[in-house]
Amino acid sequence: MVEGQRAADGFAAGWRHAFKLDPDRPIGDDALRRIAASGTDGIIVGGSSGVTFENTADLLARIRRAGSVPCALEVSSLDAVVPGFDGYFIPLVLNSRSRDFIIGHHVEAIRRYGAFIPWHRTAVFAYIVLNPVSAAARASDAEMPEDAERVLAMADLADKLLKLPYLYLEYSGAFGDMELVRRVKNRLGHARLVYGGGIAGPRQAEEAARHADLAVVGNAVYADLEQALATVPAVRRAHDNGCATQTEVERSIWKRGDNW
Ligand code: 1GP
């Protein structure tokens, strides 16, 4: 398991920017070609509702025709597990009230598909869902943490106790609290921090990338493609300006005093 996780950490290890495409939302071939050529590190295919085997397989085939960008499936429905992706992200919603979103669906998936799971290209996204009115919050029956301390405790749980490779702060549909993102980032020892939600253009992208290891852009692709494409160089700029380097340094200082 640990070996699998280490290897899994590798398949998207260098990703700083990703577009998230929803199989249930229409998108043209020209837009897909521009996304594939944008310089993004990868595409994550996933959505909160209406995801089927057919629309997922169709989107993957169209992305493959559009260019050579790495493409991962975020598995959100047991009936929509499509082979042929470069990697698989498995959501585990830390603040879900439902056992299904923490281990239930996962055990069932392994029971059904265990023999076919490419473990070395499969990694858990440990989500904390933070926008109460989002489809993700409704779908996963997420309970909003009452304060920042609880979010930080969940981050420690994922990072230090469960040693999961990714922690995903999910604000889907709204731009999040960057001060909280910063605090979570400084708390993590080894998990990579993923941020998603309300990145509408380069300004928010740069801000999010200042703290998170990986910035995910979803809705902007459908709302304003030009703005969405402009998030790719914005994320690069933030990392080139050394923002991530600074947090890496802070992180290593913190880690030196801790032997987990
Ligand atoms: C959704 O985190 C992603 O899972 C991106 O959110 O659609 O708000 O960009 P947006």
Image (tube, rainbow, N blue to C red):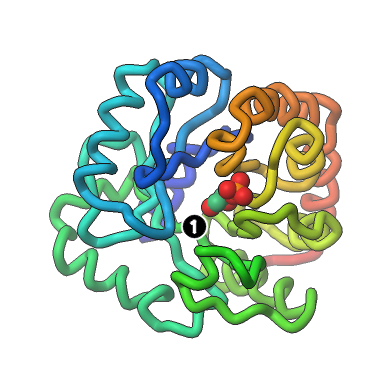
Residue 194 x, y percent position in the rendering: 62, 50
Q: Give 115 or 68, whichever is nearer the viewer.
A: 68
Q: Is residue 151 left or right of residue 87?
A: right
The residue under the point 79% across, 74% down is 148
The residue under the point 85% across, 41% down is 246
Q: Give 186 or 24, whichever is nearer the viewer.
A: 24
Whether residue 31 is visible to the viewer of this picture, yes or no, is: yes
Q: How many marks?
A: 1
Whether residue 194 is visible to the viewer of this picture, yes or no, is: no
Q: Give 182 or 138, whichever is nearer the viewer.
A: 138
Residue 179 x, y percent position in the rendering: 86, 58
* Quadrant of the rendering where the N terminus is positioned: bottom left
Q: Is residue 212 left or right of residue 107?
A: right
- Answer few, some or many: residues within 10 Å of disc 1's Cα (few below 14, many 20 plus, some between 14 and 19): many
The residue under the point 39% across, 57% down is 90
Q: Is residue 11 left or right of residue 63?
A: right
User: Taking 131 as reference, is 44 above or below it?
Assistant: above
For residue 99, what is the image quadrant?
A: bottom left
The residue under the point 43% across, 59% down is 48
Q: Which residue is the site of mark 1?
A: 125
**Helix, strand or loop for disc 1:** strand
Residue 88 x, y percent position in the rendering: 36, 47
Q: Is residue 140 left or right of residue 238?
A: left
* Quadrant of the rendering where the C terminus is positioned: bottom right
Q: Amino acid at mark 1?
A: Phe
User: Taking 57 as reference, is 176 above or below it?
Assistant: below
